[in-house]
Image (cartoon, grey):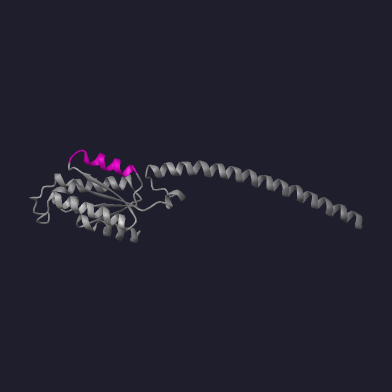
Amino acid sequence: MPGLRYVHDHARQSTLYLLEERLVGFVSVFQNLDNAYDRHVSCHLVQATDYNYGLETPERKMTMIRILFVGQKPETVDFSDPALPPGFDADKINAGIAVAVAKIKERGWEGDTCMISPDETAGPALEKQLLSAHFDCVVIGGGLRIPPKSLALFELVVNIVHKAAPRATIAFNTRPEDTADAAARQLDAA
């Protein structure tokens, strides 16, 4: 019967229309919940990145590469140590640090330095610096790594970097002037 079929088709279309409206309503509700969740999560991700937990956000991906150069304060170095290259002094190291910072900037990166004393202030000073920003790479200077008597300080530095900046790559320079090259090696490898 044609009339019965029309009523049946019309009822089916009405049912489909109602289901579609409800589905659109549900989708809208879920989108609103999803947007609220994204805003909530994004707020926490930005906060987490601020504390340098290494979580990537769109805001983080848009920022410049940031390098931290960690070394011993030149004024505290024992230049009589035979493990150090001959002819080094505090003025040469300070000049090398200035060259390092300039070469980092030439590459279009942000560069910070953290020169620490070989005493109980080293750990807290480095941790404070690492937590102040997100660092993509931490370059540890040869003056902390080369002299055998600096082994404990070197281990302290490596462990603090590992804990406070777990997503940062770690690089080692041979002298202050090749800090940017050391960072580039590790950033390219990452």
Chief secondary structure of the magenta span?
A: helix
In the image, residue 16 sits, relative to residue 184, either above or below, namely: above
Quarter occupied by residue 125: top left
Q: Which quadrant of the structure image shows residue 86?
A: bottom left
* Front in this rendered view, residue 163 or 119: 119
Q: Is residue 25 magenta?
A: no
Query: Which residue sits at x=76%, y=51%?
Result: 16
Question: In percent of the image, x 38 and y 45: which residue is there?
Answer: 53
Magenta stretch encompasses residue 127: yes
Q: Is residue 135 visible?
A: yes
Q: How far across and down, in percent of the image, does residue 82 sit?
A: 8, 54
Q: Is 84 in front, or is 107?
A: 107
Q: Is residue 88 toward the left or the right of residue 134 in the image?
A: left
In the rendered view, tell whether residue 181 sits above or below residue 132. Answer: below
Q: Which residues are magenta?
A: 119-132
Tell whether 81 sits left or right of 155. left
Where is the C terminus found, in terms of image quarters? Answer: bottom left
Q: Please count the marks in the image.
A: 0
Q: Residue at x 84, y 52 (%)?
A: 10
In the displayed structure image, the side of residue 4 where residue 21 appears, left or right: left
> Could you tell me which residue is drawn at 56 percent across and 44 percent down?
35
Residue 99 position within the rendered picture, expressed as x and y whole percent measured from the top left: 23, 55
The x, y position of residue 27, in whole percent, is: 65, 47
Question: Is 25 left or right of 87, judged from the image as shown?
Answer: right
Residue 152 position, x and y percent, is 18, 46
Q: Quadrant of the N terminus?
A: bottom right
Image vertical order of residue 81 relative to residue 132, above or below: below
Q: Look at the image and tell me whether residue 141 can be seen.
A: no
